[in-house]
């Protein structure tokens, strides 16, 4: 499923290269970013890894509330973490 | 994709893990038109994530092959959110929604990890045990990282073995169960040859990894990111620096969709008859939603459900004896990993229990029921709809969850509008296209 090739996506404006076949959640963790800020201001990252907890939701190419653990990185994808 | 995007199946399977794949392949091999829908990027569920294309002849690749060759229509990247009327399910993908209509339905919605709150559990890099494994399977580089594995259940060992094989340094596996229950589990497995092979493989893969029973996480520490974990190990607390904490307290069945469809549930498990039929006519259920029993039981139940849905009752009956044996293992799991009461005192007053709405333990403990807590604090009313905090509060406070309301997952307004009437969405794409 994963290959040696890389795909570059943009996380909050900064390019990140990830293995081809990686999910957006992986790209965000690799970039050292949180996925979202909770209602009381905490940084949150992925928890369940399977689309249940919604902690990894981000904005992808303008689309709100995308679960990044269930979305593959595609070249040029613009990801912004939710605030 | 518009509402006109409609797909009809004689047998529709919801959930693409082992139970769903077995049901779909078996039904399709009987010559009926079968669809299988799953919200993940590919089939395999959680346990077989990323293994379907494995060139070795694994159980996963064998079933993936059967699904392919039997002509099952696989719809991945689609999540079932609602049943507008009996026989019709509404599913949402990244680019729109569609209707799936069926004559017979097999629910194989699997299970999720149970998460319990403790100080610091909301820090990034504290993940589920299966959660971290899924991230690694999805490309997260993990070699050389330090991962504390904690919680309860056989999944911990499987995850630790997987991580260890991938070059992870595991300072300790903390299992909250006590040695005598674990020893009984080990002895009872002798009655189940397949499990012994798994046990031997696990033991080999875990060589040199410290395992501690009677141990659990007390707190995770760090600022913005995890730095260390304090564990209680045989009565003493110990701080362990780490990069990740992989922590899950066994599994809970995903019964939200079965509940929405009106299936009767007992003790958080969907009730089924001998042929895996639920209390709703034409709706079958297989695998973890009927009991947390592992992959062997899931495959057997899936096959029975698939055959029964295709009308092959006699062939389905041939699996009853094997199912009986596999169910013994399920009962054993139940007895071996009961949650110890000390885990109820892990959260401090300010520890967040509902992660979606940031509701603390001290706010929740004022209420006497899930419903009262929901109304006053918004606990369980965020996007996970209580999938994380529901099982946690059930354990912490003995609260019973409410009835399920549609949509069973948060859905876009366009999807909900499609229930009211046909709409044409701006982004029209092929079904399942991610």
Image (cartoon, coloured by chain):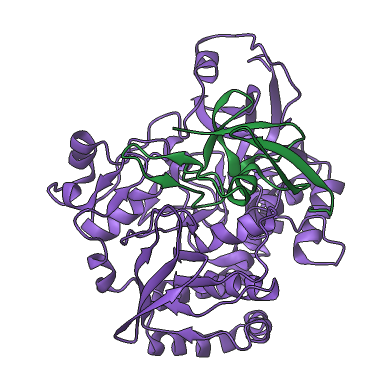
Q: Residue at x 51, y 13 (%)?
A: B417
Q: Quarter of the image for the N terminus of chain B: give it.
A: top right
Q: Is residue B210 above or below residue B268?
A: below
Task: Tell me which chain appears purple.
Answer: B
Q: Quadrant of residue B351?
A: bottom left
Q: Is residue B157 above or below residue B15?
A: below
Q: Depth check: give the residue in front, B107 or B122.
A: B122
Task: Specify whether B127 is left or right of B43.
Answer: left
Q: Residue most toward the front?
A: A14
Q: Is residue B49 above or below residue B332?
A: above
Q: Depth check: give the residue in front, B328 or B434.
A: B434
Q: Depth check: give the residue in front, A34 or B180.
A: A34
Q: Residue at x 18, y 35 (%)?
A: B376
Task: Specify whether B84 is left or right of B213.
Answer: right
Q: Residue at x 79, y 53 (%)?
A: A2
Q: Quarter of the image for the C terminus of chain B: give it.
A: top right
Q: Is residue A25 visible?
A: yes
Q: Quadrant of residue A16?
A: top right
Q: Is residue B85 visible?
A: no
Q: Is residue B236 above or below residue B17?
A: below
Task: Specify whether A16 is left or right of B230.
Answer: right
Q: Residue at x 26, y 49 (%)?
A: B400
**Residue B356 percent location from the top left of the image:** 37, 40
**Residue B76 percent location from the top left of the image:** 70, 38
Q: Chain A appears what colour?
A: green
**Residue B110 percent location from the top left of the image:** 55, 52
């Amino acid at each position: 499923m994963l290959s040696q090739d890389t795909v570059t996506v943009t996380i909050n404006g900064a390019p990140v290269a990830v293995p081809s076949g990686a999910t957006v959640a992986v790209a965000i963790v690799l970039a050292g970013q949180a996925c979202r800020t909770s209602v009381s201001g905490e940084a949150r990252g992925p928890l369940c890894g399977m689309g249940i907890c919604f902690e990894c939701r981000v904005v992808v190419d303008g689309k709100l509330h995308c679960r990044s653990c269930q979305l593959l990185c595609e070249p040029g994808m613009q990801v912004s973490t939710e605030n | 994709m518009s509402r006109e995007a409609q797909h009809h199946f004689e047998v529709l399977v919801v959930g693409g893990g082992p139970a769903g794949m077995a049901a779909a392949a078996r039904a399709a091999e009987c010559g009926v038109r079968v669809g299988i829908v799953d919200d993940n990027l590919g089939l395999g569920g959680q346990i077989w994530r990323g293994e379907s294309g494995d060139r070795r002849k694994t159980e996963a690749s064998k079933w993936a092959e059967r699904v392919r060759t039997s002509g099952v229509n696989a719809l991945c990247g689609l999540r079932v959110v609602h049943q507008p009327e009996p026989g019709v399910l509404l599913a949402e993908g990244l680019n729109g929604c569609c209707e799936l209509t069926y004559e017979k339905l097999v629910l194989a919605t699997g299970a999720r990890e149970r998460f319990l709150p403790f100080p610091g559990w909301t820090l990034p890099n504290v993940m589920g045990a299966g959660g971290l494994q899924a991230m690694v399977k999805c490309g997260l580089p993990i070699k050389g990282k330090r991962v504390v594995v904690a919680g309860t259940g056989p999944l911990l060992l499987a995850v630790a073995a997987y991580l260890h094989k991938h070059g992870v340094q595991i300072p300790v596996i903390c299992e909250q169960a006590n040695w005598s229950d674990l020893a009984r589990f080990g002895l009872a497995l002798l009655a189940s040859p397949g499990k012994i092979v798994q046990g031997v493989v696990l033991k080999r893969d875990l060589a040199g990894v410290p395992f501690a029973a009677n141990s659990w996480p007390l707190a995770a520490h760090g600022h913005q990111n995890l730095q260390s974990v304090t564990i209680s190990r045989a009565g003493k607390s110990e701080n362990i620096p780490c990069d990740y904490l992989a922590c899950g307290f066994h599994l809970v069945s995903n019964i939200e969709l079965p509940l929405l469809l009106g299936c009767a549930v007992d003790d958080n498990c969907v009730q089924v008859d001998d042929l895996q039929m639920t209390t709703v006519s034409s709706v079958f259920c297989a695998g973890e939603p009927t009991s947390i029993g592992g992959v062997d039981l899931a495959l057997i139940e899936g096959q029975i459900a698939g055959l029964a849905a295709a009308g092959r009752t006699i062939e389905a009956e041939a699996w009853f004896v094997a199912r009986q044996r596999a169910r013994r293992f399920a009962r054993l799991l139940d007895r071996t990993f009961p949650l110890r009461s000390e885990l109820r005192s892990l959260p401090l007053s300010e520890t967040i229990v509902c992660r979606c709405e940031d509701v603390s333990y001290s706010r929740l403990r004022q209420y006497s029921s899930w419903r009262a807590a929901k109304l006053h604090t918004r606990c369980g009313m965020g996007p996970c709809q209580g999938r994380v905090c529901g099982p946690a509060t059930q354990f912490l406070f003995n609260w019973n969850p409410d009835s399920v309301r549609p949509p069973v997952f948060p859905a876009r307004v366009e999807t909900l509008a499609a229930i009211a009437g046909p709409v044409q969405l701006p982004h029209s794409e092929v079904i399942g296209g991610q």
